[in-house]
Image (cartoon, helix red, strand yellow):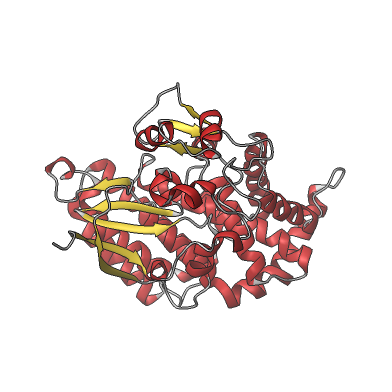
Amino acid sequence: MAEKEKALLIPQYMHHFQCIGSACEDSCCVGWRVNVDEETYKKYRKVTHSDLQPILSKQVTRNRSNPSATNFAKIKMLADSRCPFLTADMLCTIHKNLGENYLSLTCATYPRTTNQVNRVMERSATMSCPEAARLALLPKEVMEFDQVLEQIDNRKVIAKVIETDSIKVSKKAERYFWELRIFTIQILQERTYPLWQRLIVLGLFMGKVQEIVESKQFEQLESVTQNYMTFLTDGSLKQLMSEIPDQTTIQMRVLKELVDERLTQGVNNQRYLQCLNQTLQGIEYKQGATYTAVMECYNDAYQKYYQPYIDENAHILENYLVNYVFRNMFPLGERGVFGEYMMLVIHFSMIKLHLIGMARYHKGLTDEQVLKLIQSFAKTVEHNSAYLRKVYSLLAQNSFDTMAHMSILIKN
């Protein structure tokens, strides 16, 4: 009998993704914590392999604080932050000697994220994987999605589940998830607008949606969406957006403080630190430098080196944003609709800050440099939920959680 199959929605780049193993420029086995699920942990306790058993006993330890079925134990990294099972030729000794079924759920599924909407699985990839980033970000065509059939795999971890037709969400944003997702992607892929304007339009729309959610007047959502569709088509918001003042001094100060906050937690990803160092050197942000001098370099970097590249390659950041929206089930989340929009803007703006500095450092940008930054940024920031909570809290505490303040971060 054929195994059962289930519908799966994927971005088209996922058709082509496969791990490139030792050829990868930034191993996923270096630089962060690896959780081990309970089922795999129990398998490891029974391993008798003469070389692996002593390492498994010493390096795989139980989580004593709030363990769960998927976060039951952890692999203790070596002093250089490498996984103890990583060989000199950058391959996994567990996979090599015991097979794929002995990988933890974390290792078996990375960089894939699986969600479920109305009993249909969705799978995409985090941009912290260099190969996934290449496949997702570089195509000039708009990111599109396919529904395929996949054999059911009980080892897949489902990150989020949404049932839009459940009575429990009849008066919540979840009921209208598909309408919000589709229009969000439509805005982000509307290439008759520069990307910064698309983000402004999305923010104005999400602000209205937040008002609807708070008042529970969901009957207004269709007309509000139609209004913004009209705005997109007739260009009536373009004049308004052109009048938004550039406030790059505030922009750079805020984003630099957010970067500094991440550094206080410790960063051992050398690829990211290399990019950050190039950013700071590019805008000549150094001890004793005045903000006036730094801002002159920052604005020079944007106009002379960053903007010419991004005018020709805006699809890279567009694809990043669309993948973020799909993977994170935007705009749903614990922060509310507008709060999730804020976090989308923060990711975009921090990437832009780094690239502006790097552009001046290199006297221009290449696709490879941009991919290196986005991938290492994702590995350093996107996987750090504690840092992201801190960022949101800092913005809210300082009353920076308004559309006006988001516009400061978006526009140069």
**Tally of numbered tags:** 0
Q: Residue at x 67, y 72 (%)?
A: 366
Q: Nearer the viewer, residue 177 or 269?
A: 269
Residue 176 lies left or right of residue 26; in this view the side is left
Q: Quadrant of the N terminus?
A: bottom left
Q: Residue at x 65, y 71 (%)?
A: 307
Q: Nearer the viewer, residue 236 or 131?
A: 131
Q: Residue at x 30, y 70 (%)?
A: 146
Residue 60 lies left or right of residue 293; in this view the side is left
Q: Nearer the viewer, residue 292 or 121?
A: 121
Q: Tell me if residue 235 comes above or below residue 403 in the rendering.
A: below
Q: Quadrant of the C terminus?
A: bottom right
For this orientation, the residue located farthest to the top is 64
Residue 98 appears at what percent x and percent y?
Answer: 44, 47
Q: Tell me if residue 145 comes above or below residue 280 in the rendering.
A: below
Q: Residue at x 41, y 47 (%)?
A: 340
Residue 221 appears at what percent x and percent y?
Answer: 23, 56
Q: Is residue 412 something that shows in the picture?
A: no
Residue 391 appears at what percent x and percent y?
Answer: 54, 39
Residue 208 appears at what percent x and percent y?
Answer: 33, 52
Q: Tell me if residue 13 comes above or below residue 327 in the rendering.
A: below
Q: Nearer the viewer, residue 78 or 351?
A: 78
Q: Is residue 349 something that shows in the picture?
A: yes
Q: Tell me if residue 10 comes above or below residue 33 in the rendering.
A: below
